[in-house]
Amino acid sequence: MPPVRARAADGFTLLEAIVAMVIFSMGAMALYAWLGANLLTLQRVSERRATVTLVSSALDAVRRVNPMETPRGRRDYGDIEVEWDSEPVEPPRDSVTQVGLPNLFSVGLYDMQVRVLRDGEEVHRFNVRQLGHDQVREMGVE
């Protein structure tokens, strides 16, 4: 018959197995919590990237608008709509060349409020200042 001391060293006791499982499960729970936080952050980044893409497209569309001719309007671009309303910041005035001679255009500064809509719901709203222009003279005529 082997001594008692040798038999105790042959394997794990139930208490040692439970302690090992508790330590492992605490580490696994921390790892799953970290993974869950990373997945939420990744989802937020993805949503923000989609919003930035929409806003960039809307800004490009609004940059093509002359607020002096079309102070208010709406345009459809596939599944998104861009809506704007502009107010003059500076009254229109005759523009001049670099040397101070009259130019062909009258220009004014406008503050444009832009809304980006998808399926009728507002996705984003932003403001942009833009120059409006109107041709008031012909080339070679003073």
Image: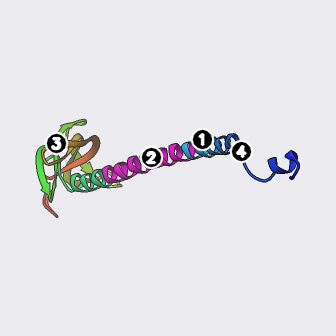
Identify the residue at horizontal 31%, vertical 49% (top origin).
51
Which residue is label 1 attached to?
26
In the displayed orientation, state which residue is furthest to the front. Answer: 1
State the separation of the CA atoms marked 1 and 4.
20 Å
The residue that mark 3 highlights is: 121
Q: Amino acid at mark 4?
A: Thr
Q: Which residues are magenta?
A: 30-52
Dominant SS type (magenta) = helix
The structure residue drawn at horizontal position 87% and vertical position 46%, both measured from the top left corner, is: 5
Callout 4 environment at 10 Å: few (<14), some (14 to 19), or many (20+)? few
- Work out whether mark 3 precedes mark 2 in sequence or the reverse, and give the earlier one: 2
Tell me the tag on residue 41: 2
Q: CA distance from mark 4 to mark 3?
A: 63 Å
Q: Name the spot of residue 4 as percent of width and height, x first.
A: 85, 45
Check disc 4 and report the residue beneath it.
Answer: 13
Which numbered mark, 1 or 4, is in the foreground of this view? 4
Q: Amino acid at mark 3?
A: Glu
**Residue 35 on image: x %, y %:** 50, 49
